[in-house]
Each structure stands twice: as structure tokens, then as C-alpha cells.
Amino acid sequence: MHIMEGYLPASHAIAWGAVSAPFVLYGAHRITKLVREKPEVKLLLGASGAFVFVLSALKIPSVTGSCSHPTGTGLSSVLFGPTVTAVLGTIVLLFQALLLAHGGITTLGANVFSMAIVGPFVAYFLYRSITKAGFGLSIAVFFAACLGDIATYVTTALQLSIAFPDPVGGVGGAAVKFLGIFAFTQIPLAISEGLLTVVVVNLLQKYSRKELSLLNILSPKAA
């Protein structure tokens, strides 16, 4: 999904950076408040960031100028919400651009918008909706992580389509092509990410029940 350095026109790169900045700034405020009120969850917050870093670094080639990989943002979206995840994802994307040549500085805003904002918001909305409907935690976590991953790639495909419309079909025609290519690699990765996230949350239920209770993932009685 990471759009590589220098691939987007300058106007697009600046626009995506401007759109993403408010989410990241508000997320930084949320993290400051969270750490001050619930210092017990700092370790879990760091582990969630590491989960995003490791999974999103496992890339395979895909659409020219981009790649396929899990995102890892579903876990922190479930635990901490989408705005906190926007900050974690931005930090990960910045380190990967500087240290791994994965993504880029000029495309940071576009990559943040797809992986650290749209994907986490979709994941959080699905998690809350599915749990509110009465389904179990594992089902909610699976669909949140899996479809949050898919939403990230749909966004990236649209970003690329807007920047490079098809000569005949325009933005819509380009979107169909980009989504079709992404689908071969990303759907299996998204399902795998959903299953892995469920495994991690099940382990957290066993070893971090107090922290999950503080984050309202488990009821105090269950903890």
C-alpha cells in the first residue's frame, strides 16, 4: 500500500498531507490524555505500535509505485480508537520511509491517510457496530482488522486513480484496474491479518486483562 517516494504529483502530496494533519494532531492530544489518565496501558500502547511496524513492513510487490502487506492497524483501533492509531501509524510510516525506504517523505500524507486514518476508522466503526449487535469479541476483531485492511487498499487505489486517471475510463477506469490488481494479493493478506489479530487479542485476554478492562474492552467483572 505504501506509495513510494516521489510517485505522486506535488499538489497531491501536499493535499493529502493537509488532510491528514488534523487527525494526527488530535490523536497526539488523545495519547497525552490517555497516558496521563491510564499510565498502566503504556506498555500495551507501545506493543500496538510495534505490531503495526512489523506487519506493515512485510511487503510484497503489487501495483507499480506501491506494494501489498498487512497493516496491523486493526489491533490498536480496537484497543485505543482510530485517532490514537493515526499517530501510531504516522510514526511507523515515518520510520519506514527514513530507515527502510518503504514509502517516502513526499508521499507520507497520502500513506497516513490510507493506512493510519481510513483503515483505523473503518476498523473501529465495524468493531463497535458488531459488538453492539451482540456478537462476540473474536468475530468483531476479525472483521475490524480484515475489512480495515481492505479499506486501506481501496483508499490507496483511489488515491492512485485520482493522480493517474485512465486515458479512456478516467478516474473510475483507473480505480477498477488498481483495485483488480490489489485484490489478488490483498484479500488473502487481509483475511490472514484478521485471524492473526484475533489470536493476539485472545492472548491479551489471558495476560493483560487488567489493561483491557481499563480500555473498556472487557468489563471490570470479566477482568
Image (spheres, rainbow, N blue to C red):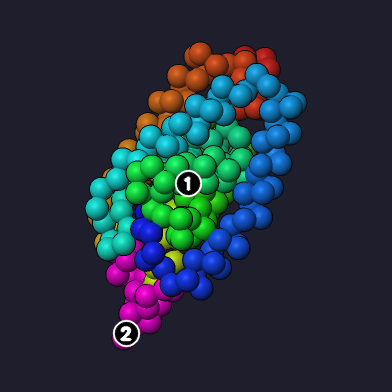
Mark 2 lies on residue: 167
* Left or right of 65, for residue 104: right
Look at the magenta stretch and give its main secondary structure. Answer: helix
The reply to whether residue 172 is in sight is no
* Quadrant holding the N terminus: bottom left
How far is mark 1 from mark 2, CA to CA?
33 Å
- Residue at 37% x, 37% y is 55
Q: Earlier in the sequence, mark 1 or mark 2?
A: 1
* Image: 103 above or below 57: below
Rendering coords of residue 47 (x, y %): 50, 26
Mark 1 lies on residue: 94
Q: Is disc 1 surrounded by few (<14), some (14 to 19) or many (20+) residues within 10 Å?
A: some
Q: Amino acid at mark 2?
A: Pro
Q: Which residues are magenta?
A: 162-180
* Left or right of 25, for residue 73: left
> Does the stretch in magenta take in 211?
no
Q: Which mark is residue 78?
A: none
